[in-house]
Image (cartoon, rainbow, N blue to C red):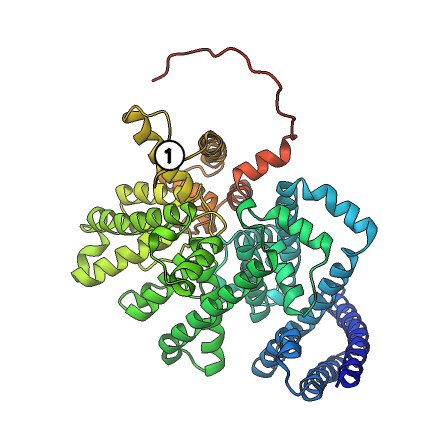
Amino acid sequence: MNLKKNNILDSWDFLELTNYFIALIFLVNLIAKHFFYYSLPYANTLVIASTVYFTIQRIYIVIATEAELKYLKRISLDLIAIAVVIVFNDYLIIFQLYLIVRQFILILDKFFSTKPAKSFVTKFRHHPAKVILSSFALIILLGTTFLALPISSADGNSIGILDALFTSTSATCVTGLIVLDTGSAFSFFGKFVIMLLIQIGGLGIMTFSTALIMLLGKKISIGGKSLIKGVLDDNIQKDLNNLLEGIIITTILFEIAGAILLYIRLSPNLPSVKTAIWHSVFHSISSFCNAGFCFYSDSFSAYRSDIIINMTVMMLIIFGGIGFSVLMDMKYNFFQKRRPFRFLSLHSKIVIVTTLILIFGGTFIIFILDYSNQLMGMSISEGFLASLFQSVTTRTAGFNTIDISQINYATALFMIVLMFIGASPGSTGGGIKTTTFAVMVLSIISIIKGRDDVEVYKRKLSEKITKEVVALVAISVAILVTLILVLSLSEKGTSFIKIAFEAVSAFGTVGLSMGITSNLTSIGKIAIILLMYLGRVGPLTLAFALGEKKLKSAYHYPEGNIGIG
């Protein structure tokens, strides 16, 4: 038995070596064809033969290992890629990109095991903010390169660098603001790139790449662990493997469940099973990652009264927006230990309660404010469902079932507040976060009651947390005011409320618009790109990356008092 396993592992190593050669062929072919517009001799035949060879490899492994679960896990992603090729056989470029990325990730993992890499990673380990900023910037630039290619466009002509950069930033930062209609302006390849950017941006590049390494059956190197621990929050660093495994499984399960439910309702209106699967998968990923990208020009307005589509999209948005640490905490306490709400962590309690208050409070206020406007022509139940959907999606997702360009100014102002608050920490959404909003409210209550401490659930919040909240809100407001001023100068003739709505939507990575995105000037597009990027990485991340870590002072100055208010 051991001899058999050794033979399998030896064969595995050899097959992996041949895969590097295939990936190199694919890379040369794609560069020649889409960058230099030169077709290599027998390129299509070579690509098809290589794809068949890789498929035979995986089938051999399944048969040789007698479908043993340990080995199936190592090739699970490969089997999914092969299934995608079988379903979407007209688009072999997707498989070529998969294999290139697959081998690149494996090379990267080996690189992080070397001594020079470990030394390099150790330096970045103490600067996680710089890792976050640089990783998102890198993915945005790569996405821009692919989206600017003619193959990404529906008409075969490049959409231009600026529009490609805008779309790439919007997808990577899971925003959803668009200068070109996603459904009609992009080819299948372009839409696939957008979907991939959404998935990477929703999870975060470090989490995504590490998850890929694990899915490919490799162990994370010590250097890789060190780097990813620096990026993740301190309170979830203890068991990195279990955390990442939980994130992967949770994401896959939610997105598959969402795709199945969406398929049930979308398939009758689409021309083929293949198209229905594609639409369902794309919108499920877009929903769970809180991205708001949609193939339909009016978003989900045509399905305003469809309870299944509305509830599916809302559930995906909510669970994607409360944060993976909260999902893990809920899973452990509610399902594994069968324990009530009070056993959840303080972070989870604040996130859940604040989220519910914002959802149902937002539903009621939107219903009241817009009842005399668009909701007037709907039944009470349809109007309530539309208000609930908009309350959920306004804080970070960007889908809509009512015409946002036709909402009244009161509704627009309230939506600006919801967009500014956003989702929860460690989630796929943006904004200042629900916990920041909760600490602000609790601090105000504490001051009104004359208490020295900010208390919640019989716990005192540290002074450090309240200081960071003040800093986060102040920096966020400063960024918004500055770039709203730029937009006011560049977008002459556009009302201030529409400009403010657009800016906060970008900063909160929401994606709702009152109809001005496609008409933005070049300066306006750049301003929105900056807002989307800063909103996704977080203002404090930028501040920490620009600042230097200083030693704590060994002394304190005497306390002084000033008048305020």
> Which residue is depicted at the point 58% across and 37% down?
542
Q: Position of residue 316 (x, y in %)?
A: 41, 62
Is disc 1 placed on a helix, strand or loop? helix
Q: Position of residue 404 (x, y in %)?
A: 33, 52
The residue lying toward the viewer, choosing from 437 and 283, is 437
Choose top left, top right, bottom left or bottom right for residue 298: bottom left
Give the amino acid type for the residue marked by disc 1 in the picture.
Met
> Which residue is depicted at the point 49% across and 37% down?
490
Q: Is residue 428 visible?
A: no
Mark 1 neighbour class, 10 Å CA radius: few under 14, some 14 to 19, many 20 or more: some
* Number of marks in picture: 1
Q: Position of residue 271 (x, y in %)?
A: 43, 81
Quarter holding the N terminus?
A: bottom right
Vertical comparison of 410 with 281: above or below: above
The residue lying toward the viewer, choosing from 528 and 477, is 477
Name the side, left or right, on which 282 lies relative to 151. left
The residue lying toward the viewer, choosing from 174 and 342, is 342
> Which residue is depicted at the point 48% across and 58% down?
289
Name the side, left or right, on which 155 lies relative to 98. left
Q: Position of residue 20 (x, y in %)?
A: 79, 71
| Residue corresponding to mark 1 | 440
Q: Is residue 88 visible?
A: yes
Quarter holding the C terminus?
A: top left
Vertical comparison of 392 with 133: above or below: below
> Which residue is depicted at the point 53% across and 38% down?
539
Name the side, left or right, on which 388 lies relative to 501. left
The residue lying toward the viewer, choosing from 337 and 207, is 337
